[in-house]
Image (spheres, rainbow, N blue to C red):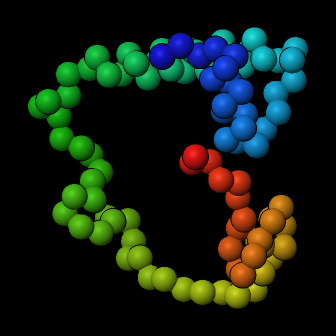
Amino acid sequence: MKIDNELLQKLEKLSSLKISDEKREGVINQLSEIVSFVENLNELNLDGEEATCSTLSGGTPFREDIPSVNNEIIKTILKHAPQSESGFFVVPKIIE
């Protein structure tokens, strides 16, 4: 995958970040290095390897998942959100 200025602009829009013009080339190089590293991982033959941690058998091995609601925490988090409505985050539409 080639990281270019067009892809970086899409990533900026999706992440709601603005990268300054003087840092763009450095960010493109860093992202290209990360993608190259991940592509190298795809070359590994892991057919005989078992996952060390898996949820295939159901649930998580670390703790029981018990839902809980704390309205004060919800209010505090939403108070710091750029936009919220009816107890939810409001985010820009990303799928056209």
Q: Residue at x 66, y 87 (%)?
A: 70
Q: 68 or 87: nearer the eye?
A: 87
Residue in the image at 70% along x and 88% along y? 71
Residue 5, horizontal then vertical, whole percent: 69, 16
63 or 87: nearer the viewer: 87
Q: Where is residue 77 in the image (x, y as percent from the top left)?
A: 76, 71
- The residue lying at 72 percent from left, 81 percent from top is 86
Q: Is residue 53 above or below residue 37?
A: below
Residue 73 in sight from this viewpoint: no
Q: Is residue 22 left or right of residue 86?
A: right
Q: In this view, does 68 lie above or below 59?
A: below
Residue 31's quadrant in the figure? top right
Residue 52 in view here: yes
Residue 11 in percent (x, y) is at: 66, 33
Q: Where is residue 1 in the image (x, y as percent from the top left)?
A: 48, 16
Q: Is residue 50 left or right of residue 75?
A: left
Q: Is residue 43 left or right of residue 89?
A: left
